[in-house]
Each structure stands twice: as C-alpha cells, then as structure tokens.
Image (tube, grey):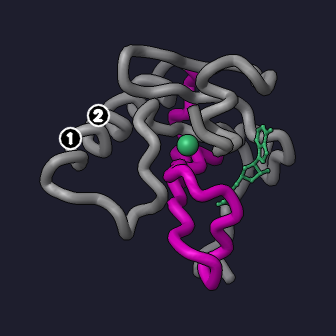
Amino acid sequence: MNDCLFCKIIRGEVPSTKIYEDEYVYAFKDIEPIAPVHYLVIPKEHIESAAKITPENSAVISHIYEVIAKIAKNEGLDDGFRVVNNCGEIAGQTVFHIHFHLMAGRKLEWPAG
Ligand code: AMP
Ligand code: ZN
C-alpha cells in the first residue's frame, strides 16, 4: 500500500467517476475539468512520471493510447481531442503517478503555455 492519490483512486479508497477500466488501466473524470471533456487515463501500476518509463514498464503506455482511442470512439470525439502528459514540476505535474489528460469538446489553443 502506498500514499499516492491515484493509487488510492484505483483501490477505491478515494472516490472517482469511472470512464473505463481494464486489467492495466483506469480512466476517470478530472475533478477540475478545463474542457467539456477532461478525463485522466492512468496505469494501475504506479509509475511516477514519463521520466520513469523503461523497457520493462513501457508496454502499458502503448496500451493507454489504445484505450484513449477506444474512449474517443465511444464518446464520439470525432472533431479531435488533446492528450497531455505533464512530467515534473516545471511542466505542472502535481500528482506523481503518471497520467494522461484527455481533453475535448472545445477549441483547444496551441501552443499551450
Ligand atoms: P497534473 O497537474 O498534470 O499532475 O494533473 C493532475 C490532475 O489531477 C489535475 O488536473 C487535477 O484536477 C486532477 N485531480 C486531482 N485530484 C483529483 C481527484 N481526487 N479526482 C480526480 N482528479 C483529480
Ligand atoms: Zn500511484
């Protein structure tokens, strides 16, 4: 057991609104959405950030992108969507369990901050 917020969400110790779940991945609604659609897609395995991806744990990342495509299809995000991974404090990472923001439903400006 660890103290990580997203591990607690996976274990059901902290409530969340589930969008998708399988053996390896959990997806849920961001608690402070910045777009009409704003989900977080996370591996069930605790990986701290993109800086900690290795040959041993990288398979779940490609699986996460398969899940994102599946969610986008299910939710009819046909106009497009954005996937964001913040790695480290200067990029704005606040929860140190790797997560991919899936955002859609409005025009998303680029470049982002
Ligand atoms: P980041 O800043 O990239 O680390 O993203 C962390 C995200 O987690 C932010 O968008 C928060 O709104 C979101 N968040 C924090 N706590 C919760 C929670 N309990 N349930 C759902 N989303 C959360
Ligand atoms: Zn964790």
Q: Position of residue 4 (x, y in %)?
A: 64, 44
**Label 1, residues with CA under 10 Å away: few <14, some 14-19, many ≥20:** few
Given residues 59 and 48, the one toward you in this image is 48
Numbered label attached to residue 75: none
Q: Position of residue 26 (x, y in %)?
A: 52, 26
Report the magenta residues as a range.
75-104
Q: Which picture quadrant has residue 94?
A: bottom right
* Pointers 2 and 1 in contact (C-beta within 8 Å): yes
Q: Amino acid at mark 2?
A: His
Q: Please name the residue that numbered disc 1 is placed on.
A: 59
Q: Please name the residue that numbered disc 2 is placed on.
A: 63
Q: CA distance from mark 2 to mark 1?
A: 6 Å
Query: Would residue 23 appear left or right of 101 to someone viewing this image?
Result: left
Disc nearest the viewer among 2 and 1: 1
Query: Would residue 40 appear left or right of 98 to someone viewing this image?
Result: right
Residue in the image at 24% along x and 46% along y: 57
**Label 2, residues with CA under 10 Å away: few <14, some 14-19, many ≥20:** some
Q: Position of residue 92 (x, y in %)?
A: 67, 73
Instruction: Tell me: is circle 1 under 8 Å from ligand 2.
Output: no
Image quadrant holding the N terminus, namely top right
